[in-house]
Image (cartoon, rainbow, N blue to C red):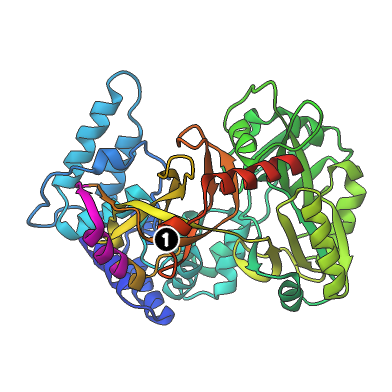
Amino acid sequence: MRFVDLAATSAAVAAISARRGKIELLAGALRALAPDEMEAGAAYLSGELRQRQIGVGWATVRETPPPAAEPTLTVAAVDAALAEIGAQSGPGSQARRRELVRALFAAATAEEHRLLLGLLSGELRQGAQAGLLVDAVAKAAEVPVADVRRALLLCGDLKSVTRTALTEGAAGLAGFRLQVGRPLAPMLAQSASTVDEALTATGAPAAVDVKLDGIRIQVHRSGADIAVFTRSLDDITARVPEVVAAVRDLPAGQLVLDGEAIALDATGRARPFQETSSRAAQRGVASVRLMPYFFDLLHLDGADLLDEPGVERWAALGRAMPPELLVARTTAATADEATVAFEAALVAGHEGVVVKAARAPYDVGRRGSAWVKVKPRHTLDLVVLAAEWGHGRRRGWLSNLHLGARDPATGGFVMLGKTFKGLTDELLRWQTERFLELATERGDWVVRVRPELVVEIAFDGVQTSPRYPGGVALRFARVLRYREDKSAAEADTIDDVRRIHMAASERT
């Protein structure tokens, strides 16, 4: 399949809002892929690389050669080129990787440039994420969508499921089984603003789990063999010996567990999320240990539990391990009971709760109503200091905002981080016009503006950060709205941000 045709499909999908229309376009492209292109093509259509990471950042693609006049690339050729780029290592690898990237872009047309930039930056905003592509795979292969979802749960790899569905149909999909040692796509939770709203979605009675501020882990044990995977199905077994040791001490011979790992200090107190993340990313941080806590059991000694109701899985989980390895859970029959559990979780320093339907099976990795998370929402009114030109779908718009808090000591502003989350097309158009009016410095990458616009930002927490001059940064910041009713002099201060950080640190 010509890569330009895939790029055209991507652009067409981005241009329409109707779900059915998107599915039709995606299915048509999937049918046109050759067998050896199916995995790469499916990855590109969902906004990813087949190789996931190839060591190319935005700095490498900031300056690309002019586009080719005529299309010559195929999906297979692009996949091979990206694989070669990712395979570079050793002395001189950065320069070789840069030259290979330039060669790929030199062979790509303008439309292909846009797709490549979106894939390499991770910001291909075409509205065709995994959930939509599942429906498209089912349509292209003429198989029930439930079969595709089930295979995805058991395999955890949409690319492999796509190839199997398109080449072997329903019979091939039926061959996917839970295999201890092979990670599954984890069940996810949707969000609600209150526990009352969450309980309405799940029904009552429901389980109310404490939401730990850790990393999601899935642990597989088959005899002496133990493997630990992240939410994105990366194998981190060698980096988390404490988790391996805890599971090895359990009496069961075969297990597939779902849970969280959280960093603890020498006294057993929970540490901030960034320390958990750093600890899981590299082995041997002596001062920080990871403690696993589990909330679900998917397999036990030869028996798959995926289709069992939650209460039965959880009962089996309770019998399989000691209480100190379990996520704290209560049962709520009313909104008042769920609220009490939510408030207790916050007092204990946790992120919030996850409300879970008692009779629901363990479903494929999408956000259904069976699990609903509730967290308190923090907001700050901050000042826009600069913005970065977008790329991919946002090319031509000023997108990524540089956010600053007011510093009452100096009268200036302290940068806390960046975000492009929460911006609608209407906001992108409006802010681009306003930023250009307020511009004090126009670069090819960043436009600096007079600190006048106040924007309301929601975020999940504040973390220590040596990257920014204030020593702190916002976690998962996203735009709620611009506050044209506020002046920059009324924005929140760096002292406000530090107080939030200190309060969270004291709770942990």
From the top left corner, tell me how far across and down residue 334 is, in percent: 86, 75
From the top left corner, tell me how far across and down residue 265 is, in percent: 75, 29
The N terminus sits in image quarter = bottom left
Question: Can I make out residue 8 in this image?
Answer: yes
Residue 434 falls within the magenta-colored stretch? yes
From the top left corner, tell me how far across and down residue 8 is, in percent: 24, 67
Q: Amino acid at mark 1?
A: Val
Is 297 placed left or right of 169 in the picture? right
Seen at 81% across and 28% down, the residue is: 267
Is 170 placed left or right of 421 in the picture? right
Is 115 placed left or right of 460 in the picture? left
Question: How many numbered tags mark residues here?
Answer: 1
Is 82 placed left or right of 481 in the picture? left
Residue 175 falls within the magenta-colored stretch? no
Q: Which of 72 and 190 lies nearest the eye of the viewer? A: 190
| Label 1: which secondary element | strand
Q: Which of 364 and 210 lies nearest the eye of the viewer? A: 210
Q: Which of 66 and 58 lies nearest the eye of the viewer? A: 58
Question: Can I make out residue 303 in this image?
Answer: no
Seen at 19% across and 47% down, the residue is: 444
Residue 115 vs 367, above or below: the answer is above
Residue 184 vs 397, above or below: the answer is above
Q: Main secondary structure of the magenta part?
A: helix
Q: Residues within 10 Å of mark 1 (few under 14, many from 20)?
A: many
In magenta, the rendered stretch is 429-444
Where, by quadrant of the figure, is residue 422 drawn? bottom left
Seen at 76% across and 70% down, the residue is: 360
| Residue that carries the numbered disc 1 in the rendered image | 454
Residue 98 vs 388, above or below: the answer is above
Seen at 91% across and 42% down, the residue is: 322
The C terminus sits in image quarter = top right
Q: Which of 370 and 225 lies nearest the eye of the viewer? A: 370
